[in-house]
Amino acid sequence: MPTVLFHIGSRPIYTYTVLIDAGLLLGLLVTWWLGRRRGLSPPALMDVLSIVLTGGLLGGRLLYVLLNLAYFSQHPWESLAIWRGGISFHGAFIGGGVALLIWSAAGRRPIWQWADLLCPALALGGVFGWLACLAGGCAYGEAGRGALYLRAADIYGVMARRFPTQWFGIGQSLLLLGILLWALFRQRAGLSTALYLIDYFGGQFVLEFWRGDEVPYLGALRLTQWLDLLLFLAGLALLASWGKGRQPASSVPDLPPPEEASPHP
């Protein structure tokens, strides 16, 4: 996959950027479509999407800066230059989740209804995110030998036989997208969110043992693996609550509140 997709004049347009933007746009469209099918009004959908995107952007940048603190402590002003790239998915997920929680609590809205609605977009975005990393060399696998190891470049352009972390990430995200769409139409609040937390972050916890990119460690595990583990356990707790036949805490039946419902589905 080419690093540069095309040029506008002398300016290169990177494949990574195009794929990330495409994933974001398609994720928004999927959420909009699912929300309209459930009778949610355009203003309500616009509100939740803008709130979650803002929280995700801030959280993703903050964790990225913290994970690369050695560099940003020497270049503090560059921590604000988000247009130059650098977003942590874990930070974006947590930041978006906190923003959604605050927005839901402030308006007494059913948080699990909205969280479930956003999960398929996250899985679809994951497909494009991993494709972008395949093009840009980020999240590359460790170098080694074996039947599974393929020739690939790291983020610095160094070619070697590497564990295909990006391909595994793409496959996991595609499978998860199908599972989440099935779960969403089961009409059980919190089920899609629980399955996303369990599948994605559980899979990432395992996959990171074969990652070759450098991140801080905390004990024997990468710092991001500790976040994977915490989010995976949160998913198990949510699924256990769902499995006992009752709605998770802070949720209501899977219907939009009257003030946010659209008269036309």
Image (tube, grey):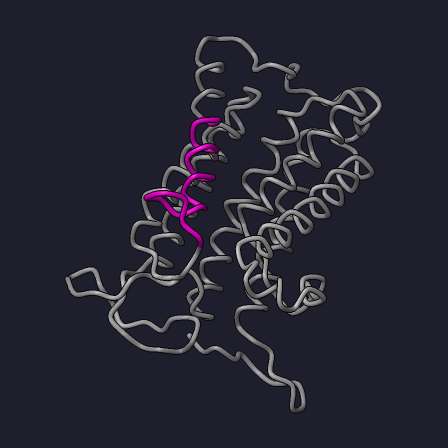
In the depicted structure, whether residue 133 falls above or below residue 208: below
In this rendered view, identify the residue nearer to me: 20 or 102: 102
In this rendered view, identify the residue nearer to me: 154 or 176: 154
Q: Quadrant of the C terminus?
A: top right
In this rendered view, identify the residue nearer to me: 159 or 169: 159
In the depicted structure, whether residue 193 falls above or below residue 212: above
- The secondary structure that most of the magenta stretch takes on is helix
The picture quadrant where one finds residue 72 is bottom right
At x 58%, y 68%, the residue is 18
The picture quadrant where one finds residue 84 is bottom right
Q: Position of residue 73 (x, y in %)?
A: 62, 62
Q: Quadrant of the N terminus?
A: bottom left
Is 42 left, or right, of 149 in this rendering? right
Q: Position of residue 36 (x, y in %)?
A: 70, 36
Is 109 inside the magenta-drawn segment? no
In this rendered view, identify the residue nearer to me: 29 or 94: 94
Is 223 inside the magenta-drawn segment? yes
At x 27%, y 61%, the residue is 163
How many labels sit on residues? 0
Q: Which residues are magenta?
A: 216-235
Q: Position of residue 245 (x, y in %)?
A: 48, 8
Q: Residue furthest bottom?
A: 10
Q: Residue furthest top?
A: 245
Q: Position of residue 9 (x, y in %)?
A: 67, 90
